[in-house]
Image (cartoon, coloured by chain):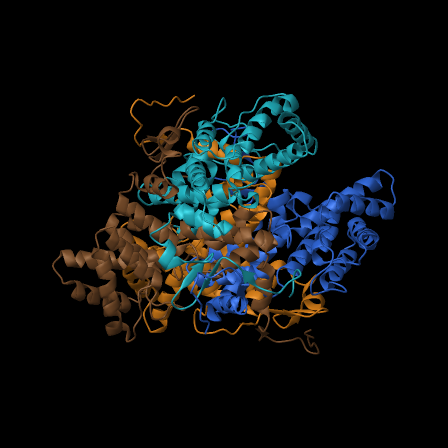
Chain colours: A blue, B orange, C cyan, D brown
């Protein structure tokens, strides 16, 4: 069944014969293995180009910033899944990644789109503050969420965001989107009537867009990072299992608020 | 419902308050972001320790070696999934990771278990060749697959395996498991009656066990690496879509070999 | 970490003690097992009520209609995943379900939303044709996809849609949304400048909304149905494996359109 | 890349042209939609044959028995995933299915394999008790888990198992595997030194093997059933969200038992 327009299969990422594997125009074994770091290779595979020193530093910094934050919901889902299906590590990792959605980790991409729209208006001559206010207002009116601001734990200030901005400055990266991210922080109280500070999910596109990382792949950064974090947690689960204990604690104190059949009462221990 | 023995929730990976995030005893923002690479952080989160230079070099080398090999089945599954559900990048990544199973990428762990068993016999006094032959024979008799040898494309020799061994030598890493991997290659024809050469999946534990990377987390290396590769492919899919074309080509020429209802014939275009 | 407003856990679906399991106010063992069909139970668990005869007939009919359509992309993804990870049936099923997204099987929900919006305007006094045209035009202008119309294979007419409409008539169900679905079919050429006929994904909400099936759960119908189809395919895969053959055929004839390192040529067999 | 022996794509499940869809030799629109229930269709698609009345009754009964058991770990994982990624219902369902693994719901298949092995010895002349004891002992010695016996909540007796056995008797199904399941219950205390009673996961193969349901597809029954249960829970999540509350309760009271950097203390609210 032909779905869509093309039946041609083309890809520019990798090709191989029996002796040689080529990735993005480089010989994997001769030029890359043992010579570049994993993040450098990820940048090459994704964009087709080796990263500049600033791009690599910021890619590493954002990946490090977002890999771990303890027993967040996706880690819990992953550890519960592993407890139930310990033969399939890949399944538990997949379950955890599936929680990198629009509300939690997908915010990086949404915030990036906001910043790019603001930057477009700035190129057309608007000031950064006017453009930020206009776009935040327009998104709000269209009921699009302003993602990447506010954090349930780091309420006053997400230390990861500030550290990422420092790294961008140290690397002398283009700070345009960092400034936009800060202008958005100032615009938010004017539109939403409450203060929400920049969190790590907005800081990621703020620093990465400045070094040319593609917006369409932005959600890939938290996904890749969290995969590393999930593997760490699942390895811990192999020798310190808590998957079922998490489920026990989550359920305890929960209540059934439906009906009972006539004459039935349930005894809880 | 209490499943298992404990209801206590403990983890040694990460803790946080409003101002500080601690990962494995280090302050994430002060000590890690902007100071360590993503692979270094992964090692720390997973094992609780920063890697030695050799451990880091080999972790990077194995991750780089296994990230990409073109349009392999898991990449195809992932691109087809993304074509059907483009709003959910995380779902397409998860679909691809689910193909890191016992037959394809899980081989790293299985091969690692084989090597560790051989090493145990060597410690008990057997020669490397005798131990390798004995264990390969025992696994064969128990119908356990000898994973990590032979490759559908790199039949004579998987260049990634040899390059990884070279990096291990350059790093002056413990080569014990590399030697075991080579002894297994020699033992295989005596048990299976055919030659199968070391592939990248056996080379990964061969070099990583020598630098202390935990066996139970070995499958995490291809899973993390392939996640990076999948993100590169899915980013390509956003601007050069081939997901549906792959499915079209896969199905074309396929045949229905079931029955047809009386009187029905199907017309194929 | 408290995310969102509530920390209270309440559910009205199921409760149990050591002796009794209650689902939606009924005793699972006494009232349901052996007394209701799986679809009837699904309706009860989902909505809290046993289905009327028409609601059950149409739920069964829609589930039957959408379970199978051969080697569609999600089935291919699932069979490839199973070939690579045969120990984890659940992983291969999950990979297939992940392809029930906005473009392919999620269309049921999107079409349902379109119909409900039209029905709202009809209640406010507009004619079915005016309301349909207005809503199709508004969605088109807002760049929201008009889902559930047109099919790559059943171009002139999707026989499943027509059969579902017949079953709705046989069951004397409320045909309001069927009529809306047909009015949309007539409105489309006026807005999109081409004819697209109703497919099964639009027919599902058209018949189910009329028997009170909740719009927010509409995507659950194709997901549940396809799970059954995937299990059938994966069982076939256990004795007639084609997962890797599909990937081989999909890739064959594909082309690497990236660069090669200087001096490297790849030999294809 | 050719993996495995064949490059031929054949399937006997479904074929279609523009006008007709054939499933297992029947015309989907003419013979099946509106005429068979979803379970009946599932049986046909899976096995190639319509079920006998007893086979259908037992398939429905087992699916109904295993669909729901409240906020079990896989439901929690699914609801947490949906809370984080509400746009992707399919992802939350997939996350829940991934918990149908060897420890929890995969037990149906494992128990089925045990029963089939016992039945083989009975055909060779052993008594049911001798065969059951011998096989339980052999599995125990080989460290293979005896799955499907004992339940964390239904300790004395799983009411679903007994109800399924009753349905099998009502349907005059072949009770051979039910008797084997009971013989295994008696054998267990002789081998494991404790009593474990039959749970629903052992009852499923016990009743389904007697009506010819294929062992290799046994894990499909809980997977399909739980998919229905997950959809019910995710629909509830759309209007009574508890996904994040579950994660909050699970984590609260948890403890970080790793180290803190010198001079750092964390303040918990």
- Viewer-closest of B159 and C178: C178
B144 vs C262: above or below: below
Look at the image and tell me whether residue C38 can be seen: yes
In the rendered structure, the answer to whether residue C139 lies left or right of residue C71 reads right
Position of residue C118 measured from the top left corner of the image (x, y, whole percent): 63, 33
> Quadrant of the image for the C terminus of chain D?
bottom right
- Viewer-closest of D132 and C26: C26
> Quadrant of the image for the N terminus of chain D?
top left
- Residue situated furthest front in the rendering: A262
Look at the image and tell me whether residue C268 can be seen: no
Name the quadrant containing residue A169.
Answer: bottom right
Position of residue C268 measured from the top left corner of the image (x, y, whole percent): 45, 34
In the rendered structure, the answer to whether residue D174 lies left or right of residue A225 reads left
B38 vs D1: above or below: below
Residue shown at the point (79%, 40%) measured from the top left:
A120
- Residue situated furthest bottom in the rendering: D263
- Viewer-closest of C104 and D169: D169
Name the quadrant containing residue C225.
Answer: top left
- Residue situated furthest left in the rendering: D125
Position of residue C221 measured from the top left corner of the image (x, y, whole percent): 48, 42
Task: Please give the count of numbered marks on the rendered protein.
Answer: 0
């Amino acid at each position: 069944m032909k779905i869509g327009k093309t039946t041609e299969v083309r890809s520019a990422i990798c090709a191989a014969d029996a002796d040689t594997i080529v990735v993005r125009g480089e010989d994997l074994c001769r030029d890359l293995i043992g010579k570049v770091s994993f993040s450098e290779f990820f940048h090459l595979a994704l964009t087709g180009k080796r990263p500049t020193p600033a791009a690599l530093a910021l890619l590493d910094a954002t990946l490090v910033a977002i890999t771990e934050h303890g027993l967040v919901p996706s880690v819990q889902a992953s550890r519960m899944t592993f407890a139930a299906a310990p033969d399939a590590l890949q399944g538990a990792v997949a379950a955890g990644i599936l929680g990198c959605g629009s509300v939690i980790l997908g915010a990086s991409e949404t915030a990036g789109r906001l910043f790019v729209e603001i930057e477009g208006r700035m190129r057309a001559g608007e000031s950064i503050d006017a453009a930020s206010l206009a776009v935040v207002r327009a998104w709000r009116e269209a009921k699009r969420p302003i993602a990447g601001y506010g954090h349930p734990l780091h309420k006053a200030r997400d230390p990861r965001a500030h550290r990422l901005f420092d790294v961008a400055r140290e690397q002398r990266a283009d700070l345009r989107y960092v400034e936009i991210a800060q202008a958005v922080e100032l615009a938010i109280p004017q539109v939403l009537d409450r203060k929400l500070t920049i969190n790590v999910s907005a800081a990621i596109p703020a620093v990465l867009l400045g070094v040319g990382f593609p917006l369409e792949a932005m959600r890939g950064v938290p996904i890749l990072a969290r995969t590393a974090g999930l593997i760490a947690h699942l390895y811990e689960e192999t020798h310190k299992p808590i998957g079922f204990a998490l489920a026990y604690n989550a359920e305890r104190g929960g209540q059934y608020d439906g009906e009972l059949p006539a004459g039935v009462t349930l005894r809880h221990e």
